[in-house]
Image: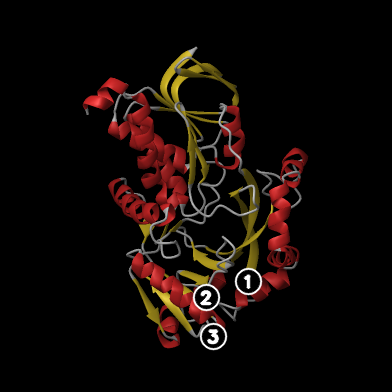
Amino acid sequence: MSTQDVTIIGAGIVGLATAYQTLRARPGLDLLVLDKETALAAHQTAHNSGVIHSGIYYKPGSLKARNCRRGREMLIRFCRDHAIPFDLCGKVIVAVNQRERPALQRIYERGIQNGVACDMIDPTQLRDLEPHAAGIGAIHVHDAGIVSFLDVCRALVAEIERLGGRVLLGAALLDAARDRNDMLLTTSAGRMRSRVVVNCAGLQSDRVARLLGTDVSLKIVPFRGEYYELCPAARSLCRNLIYPVPDPAFPFLGVHFTRMINGSVECGPNAVLALGREAYARDQLNIPDLADTLAFPAFWKLASRHWRTGAGEVWRSLSKTAFVRALQRLVPEITADQLTPAPAGIRAQALAQDGSLLDDFAIVEDDRVVNVCNAPSPAATSSLSIGLSISEHILHRLTPRAQIAVM
């Protein structure tokens, strides 16, 4: 039986950033990152749109706002230090009619409160930035950018290993128990003992939390984000990033245009209930996962509140014509023949007992386990900041009580 000081479950960007920040603070710790997949960052991180978020949308003072702003700076520094390509290209948030002006103004005011470099611009200025975008006004967000978060993860693994940590793929957590001051973990790679366990399991985080003996009332509900990609001849319709004014009652930003770091342009996402936590294809079905979602009473509370929005998302999923119409609100020249299907992603959305969608980061912990139970966008942008915060929780648990009193 192997023994670790720290075991982190989940080799996505949050788990890897946590490992990196912990080892930076205390090199030489026996730290292991486990993941059930054989590929690195195989789920939310690998399917991420690659946007470096600015923090403009988030409530001032919230964990999202604080971590996004701090994490953005840390991410940019990390990319520069490790020669990871990125582009601070900026983005525009576009109001297409007068009804959206008040919401646009509120977003701008939040951005100013959060320290985001942004300007209100008129239609002429919008056309200078995005000649094919249509709107009566917009916010130009200077702080937004693009990167490959998978490249960031590869660099994090190299740093983890340089600092003495290990990353073990293809090792699923099967069972857990508590033994005196340690956690006993049974994995597909063998049994192990760990002083502290950190749950960064993303789509499976609520299940892993319960397996680790933590009582969490929330449940992860998977939403599939469906995308199209502009054909190469149509990429000039979007220079950088074009976003709509989001619905404040729904924690999704709406369909938008995203230039990727490789030069391609994604359009989306459409957000529909996934038929499994890892069911990326439309025809992919995981019956136990779906039954788990449908048996959760809070899901039906959510559905009753947002059925109109949900119906619209389902209709755009079924109808390419409807999807194109949604895109044409921002870029009227878009046509269906310019779009080809792109890989979908799945968002691990935490749902509370009252049917509300948790919009902020959520950490549930006890004396031996730290569970990251909700890490929605902008978690990738914020990962190094989140990881630093979690590392402080880890190191506190590894420090003897007498030493804490002296310090």
Q: Which residue is mark 3?
A: 98
**Viewer-side residue, 125 vs 62:** 62
Q: Residue type at mark 3: give it.
A: Gln
Q: Residue furthest bottom?
A: 124
Q: Nearer the viewer, mark 3 or mark 2?
A: 3
Q: Is residue 37 visible?
A: no
- Report how many numbered discs are placed on residues in the image: 3
Report the colour scheme. secondary structure
Horizontally, residue 290 falls left or right of residue 77, namely right
Query: What is the secondary structure assignment of the residue under circle 3?
Result: helix
**Which part of the image, by quadrant, shows the C terminus?**
top left
Q: Please give the label number shown on residue 107.
A: none
Residue 101 horizontal/vertical position (percent)? 50, 81
Pointers 1 and 2 in contact (CB under 8 A)? yes
Q: What is the quadrant of residue 340 in the picture? A: bottom right
Label 3 vs 2, first from the N-terminus: 3
Q: Is residue 73 above or below residue 202?
A: below
Distance, label 3 to label 2, CA atoms, is 24 Å
Distance, label 1 to label 2, CA atoms, is 10 Å
Q: Which residue is mark 1?
A: 338
Q: Is residue 302 above or below residue 156?
A: below
Q: Residue type at mark 2: give it.
A: Leu
Query: What is the secondary structure assignment of the residue under circle 2?
Result: helix
Label 1 vs 3, first from the N-terminus: 3
Q: Residue furthest left?
A: 406
Q: Which residue is mark 2?
A: 237
Residue 72 horizontal/vertical position (percent)? 36, 54
Q: Is residue 25 visible?
A: yes
Label 1 vs 2, first from the N-terminus: 2
Residue 94 horizontal/vertical position (percent)? 49, 77
